[in-house]
Structure formats: structure tokens, C-alpha cells
Amino acid sequence: MRRPSRSFRLPELPLLAAMVVVAASLAGCASKPPADDPEAVAEYTEANDPMEPTNRVFYAVNNGLDTVILRPLAVGYKYVVPYVVRSHIHNVLTNLSMPASLFDDMLAARPRRAGTSLMRLLVNSTVGVAGVFDVATDWGWPAHDSDAGMTLALWGLPEGPFLFLPVLGPTSPRDASGFGVDVATDPITWVGSGVLVSSLGYTRWGMTAIDTRTNVLDDLDKIKAQALDPYATIRSLYRQHRQSQIDEARSDDRATVPAWFVQPARP
């Protein structure tokens, strides 16, 4: 009897999204302004969005899905579920991502950040009751942003042009590739197959989407209501946020010992 294939297929999302983008890009790319218009050329270069027509189509699709599905779910989740419960759910989701973060910190050659990720995983998975409580932060191992896209940036890989992908939203070729790496290195991807594994995987993915959307509920509402061009605003904010994460990782010299332990003096 043939063994059933692994049913949890989130690792295929970046590939599918990339295929959609490649196909759509054949039908819509922004033309570079003529060289005799330096201001337009400078604006085009700064935007680094050669696939803007296609990206805007995907933004409109995602925005429609968000308006009809994701935002109402986030509003209901915030209204029905008490903040303390939402906080614990967020802690669990964060703890589930720790193995991938640990792997990324190691690949980025950041041993102190890797040590912090390891201690957060160990402490919160045990004393923190499977990540429900963020004990590690109180004990001196605070959370930090870490993903494969940031690791690729620390390796020197350029981000490439701006992309707005179906489901994934604003990203870049570097970050989309990093997303695929993080999903591939996530333990739940390899834990096995079957209805239970698939249910746990998709439940986690769905809760992560709702948790993330809830955390930006007010900010995104303001952008959509006040920005003259929400797409361009989101593009700019995404790049600023990613660059700040990368800069922080590049300059991070945190120690792996708790905050209450005697730290070496900085020169």
C-alpha cells in the first residue's frame, strides 16, 4: 500500500506565489521613465517596484480578502477574547517559532542571539508551560526578531525589487525565499502526516494570521482611511520596518546571560 504523502504543504506557498508572480509579470510591468526625465527616473529607482502594476492587482485582491474575511475575524477576536488570553496565545505562537529562529540565528553567525533563542525555547517550553507564559523575558532573555530573510540580508544578499504576493502580502524575493526556508525548517513541517498534524498546522497558521492582523488593526485602519495611496504607504513602511530589523540584528551585541547577572563593561 502506498504511503500517503505529507499533507501539511505550507512550504509550497512561496513557490506557488512566485509562480503566480512570474506569470503575472509577463502581463504587467512598470516601464522605466525616459532618461531625459531625471526626477521620474529617481522616483522609479527609489521605489524599486518594477512590477508595480501586477503588485497593485495583488494588493487589491489581498485587500478585498482582508476586508471580507481577515479583518472581521480580527475584530471579532479582539472583541470576544480577553487581552490576557490573546497575550497567552501570542506567547504560544511565538514559542512555536523559536526552533526556526534558533536555526536562523545560528546561520547568521550570531551566537549570543542564538543563545537567547535557545534559552527562550527551553525556559518558556518548560517553566512557561509550553510557551503560555513568557518567563524567559522576565529572567533576562528578551525576544528579538529573527527570520531567514534577515539572515540572508546579514549574508549580504540584496533584497531585490518590491513584491506584493497573494496571501503573503508585502515582501521581496529575499524575504519570500526566507519565508520558505523558515517553513521548511519548522519542526511541525517534518513531524509526520495525517489529519491531526494537518489540523494542528493549519490551526497554527490561521491563528498566526489572526494574531498578526489583530496587532496591526488600528494602524492599518488609519493607513487605509488617511493615506492618499495606501499601497505606496504600505510599501514604504514595510521597507523601513525590515531595514530597522536588519540594522538591529547587525548591531546586536546582547549577552546570553540573564540581565541580572553581572555584565562585562563595554569599551
Image (tube, rainbow, N blue to C red):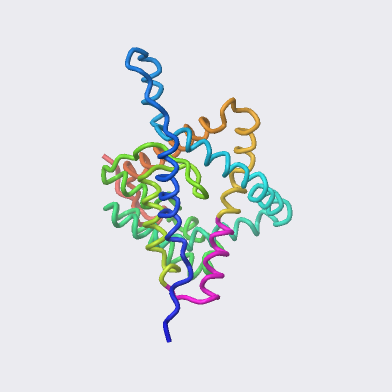
Q: Nearer the viewer, residue 53 or 241?
A: 53
Q: Position of residue 8 (x, y in %)?
A: 48, 68
Q: Is residue 230 left or right of residue 2?
A: right
Residue displayed at 33% across by 55% down: 105
Q: Quadrant of the N terminus?
A: bottom left
Question: Looking at the picture, how far across and down is residue 153, in whole percent?
Answer: 32, 44
Q: Nearer the viewer, residue 110 or 179?
A: 179
Using the image as rendered, state which of residue 88 and residue 203 is in the foreground: 203
Residue 185 drawn above or below residue 73: below
The furthest residue to the bottom: 1
Residue that sits furthest to the top in the current view:
36
Task: Please report the residue visible at 42 percent of the width from the left and 40 percent of the height from the top.
Answer: 25
User: In the current view of this chain or complex, which residue is farthest to the right?
Assistant: 80
Point 52% across, 41% down: residue: 58
Q: Position of residue 260 (x, y in %)?
A: 42, 54
Please state the extent of the stretch shown in magenta in the rendering: 191-208
Residue at image location 57% in from the left, 39% down from the top: 60
| Quarter containing the C terminus | top left
Question: Magenta part mainly helix, strand or loop?
Answer: helix
The answer to whether residue 58 is magenta is no
